[in-house]
Image (tube, rainbow, N blue to C red):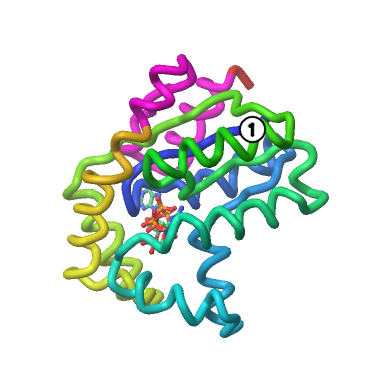
Amino acid sequence: MRLVLLGPPGSGKGTQASLLKDRLNVAHISTGDLLRAAVAAETDLGKIAKATMDAGELVSDELVLQLLEDRLGEPDAANGYILDGYPRNLAQAEALDGLLERLNQTIDHALALIVDQEQIVHRLARRSAEQGRSDDSEEVVRHRLTVYSEQTAPVAAYYDRKGLLTNIDGMGTIEEINERLVKALGH
Ligand code: AP5
């Protein structure tokens, strides 16, 4: 199964993808995690991406597409995957379609987590206090939410037009949300 998990920053994409990947026996591919690993390893890509990520802006489409293409070529992605944080704008959605066509693959479902803005701010403030992620400061979170509504929100309509989108209530406990996702996938 190949899934796209959509939702604003702090909506629980990473949390839910790591639960779903075990249930579905597929890979969890987070472009944010791939980028953070590149930053930590101080690769050329990581050095380019760091300032952009710290500012809450999107890293260039070309760089992220290359990162994704390399990751999709790894053995654990052969059985399917959950894309978390990609595509992030319409150009990336179209680039993904092109890449999947070359790989002779298709996306089976796009699931969008719907969460109140107040809850997002609360979750990310808590993570900021607990983990100190460099883009979780109040100011950068506000900017990430603006980038989301301007650039990423239209991606949901892109998958809706393809008949692949299901909106999922992303409020409640992690377990409750997981149950809704599993049910939507018919598992
Ligand atoms: P990315 O890592 O994708 O960050 P994001 O989308 O902002 O997502 P988050 O990780 O903040 O939230 P999430 O929805 O995964 O929620 P999570 O499960 O972590 O991207 C970071 C940056 O990388 C971007 O700004 C950009 O610069 C760059 N980037 C990444 N992809 C890119 C792309 N495709 N193109 C260009 N640039 C890209 O949960 C959040 C917190 O809430 C956690 O602490 C969690 O424990 C908690 N939580 C989760 N669920 C619940 C719940 N039900 N109740 C209470 N707390 C909960």
Please state the horizontal and vertical placement of residue 157, each as a whole percent of the image. 34, 26
Q: Give coordinates of residue 155: x percent, y percent.
A: 37, 35
Residue ID for mark 1: 2
Q: Residue at x 52, y 67 (%)?
A: 35
Ligand 1 quadrant in view: bottom left
* Residue 21, percent from left and from top: 65, 43
Instruction: Determine the residue located farthest toward the right in the rendered image.
Output: 75
Disc 1 residue type (three-letter): Arg
* Image: 158 above or below 27: above
Question: What are the residue bounds of the magenta stretch?
Answer: 156-185
Which residue corresponds to the image point at 42% horizontal and 77% vertical from the top-left? 50
Q: Indicate whether residue 72 is drawn in magenta.
A: no
Residue at the extreme top: 163
Q: Residue at x 46, y 18 (%)?
A: 162
What residue appears at the point 28 percent right and 40 percent down from the top-left corner? Answer: 115
- Give the left or right position of residue 43, taking residue 58 as reference: right
Vertical arrangement, residue 41 with respect to residue 59, above or below: below
Q: Quadrant of residue 6?
A: top left
Number of other residues with Cα within 10 Å of mark 1, as a class: few under 14, some 14 to 19, many 20 or more:
many
